[in-house]
Amino acid sequence: MPKKGKLPYQELKRRLAILEAILNSLRHGQADAIISRYGVNLLRIRELEETLRRSEENFRGSMDTSPLGIRIVTETGETLYANRALLEIYGYETLEELQSTSTRERYTPQAYAEHLVRRHRRQRGEYVPPNYEISILRKDGEVRHLEVFRKEVIWNGKRQFQVLYNDVTERRLAEQALRESEIMYSALVNQSLDGIIIIQDEVIKFINRAFANMTGYREEELLGMPFQSVVAPEDRDWVTERHRRRMAGEAVPSVYETRLMCKDGTLLFVEVSAGLSEYQGRPANLTYLHNITERKQTEEELKRSHEQLHNLARYIEDVRERERTRIARELHDEMAQSLTVLKWTYPGWIRPCIKTNYHFVRR
């Protein structure tokens, strides 16, 4: 049983058929036929005629002033009406000029092939989505991309089709440029030798291939991991504090050195370059990490070599000083012995000279 206040489907269908027959008769000036067949009051017919006329005028006026391109076409694709917006999209001055140009000429080759597929499916009675996209060739040869919406309408008392066209060329070009930019960015990021990560809510949200290789983790292991997990335990507190201060908008150094702890427990020295960014519409920390482990090892080796050279120089100087002291002592002892011999060997008159010289040598 139908619900109260709602007509059964068959009754509704019957009434719609009567209404369509009345409208068709009114369009063709057959008011008498309506009166005799349906018993409709003449005054009511005149009201319906006026309502229909106004409705068609409003419908036509809305299409004429619409910013969207609009065509009324037959089932076979013949154009019955085109508004000014559609003519401007195609670059034609008049409807006749548009009608005289074949569909093949108005479509790009691929779009024309897709048009044929849609037409053949309609001819076979198959369902064709009312929304689709086409690429057209303007009169000047420029390619434009259009969104299309097709629906049935009654036009001059007959079943025709209204087709709406929305020019989305600029949007498509912007999307293409964005895709190309993303492809290039992805290539640069994944080919980078430096690790790149995005941290949000203190969790790793994005990594490049270099960072995964650097730490020894797989990508799926790193994504969603707290970023502190890959920081050396001794550095975690101050690195976390610096990250939080940066996210709070405080001025903190953007470039610094720290150590990463790899999956196998080894430590890597990295130079970090961090800055605020946005990821999926929310603030994030974009971080570049350059592996400086080899440089640190080289610096440590140079430091050890410098210390060894310094110690060697001090040792050599100590040896020289000891040798100078030993030689001076030996010379002193030999000179003292020689003077003593002279003192007892030579006559008495020379001894005062020897004694004087002896004291001089001692001094």
Image (cartoon, helix red, strand yellow):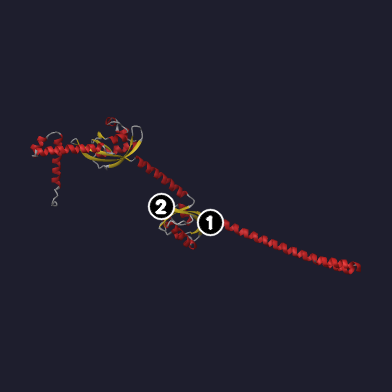
State the image coordinates of residue 321 (x, y, percent, origin top left): 72, 63
Q: Residues within 10 Å of mark 1 (few under 14, many from 20)?
A: some
Residue 231: which disc? none
The type of residue carrying mark 1 is Thr
In the image, what residue occupies the spot 11% across and 35% down? 31
- The image quadrant of residue 33 is top left
Say which of 286 and 259 sits in front: 286
State the image coordinates of residue 57 (x, y, percent, origin top left): 20, 36
Left or right: 224 with respect to 291? Answer: left
Instruction: First in sequence, mark 1 or 2: give its number.
Output: 2
Seen in the picture, residue 265 relative to 147 is either above or below; the reply is below
In the image, what residue occupies the spot 72% across and 62% down? 320
Residue bearing mark 1: 293
Residue bearing mark 2: 278
Quadrant location, the C terminus:
bottom right
Left or right: 31 with respect to 190? Answer: left
SS at badge 1: helix
Left or right: 78 with respect to 316? Answer: left
The type of residue carrying mark 2 is Glu
In the image, what residue occupies the spot 13% across and 39% down? 47
State the image coordinates of residue 292 (x, y, percent, origin top left): 53, 55
> Does any portion of residue 159 appear in the rendered image?
no
In the image, what residue occupies the spot 43% across and 47% down? 185
SS at badge 2: strand
Seen in the picture, residue 314 relative to 99 is either above or below; the reply is below
State the image coordinates of residue 276 (x, y, percent, origin top left): 43, 53
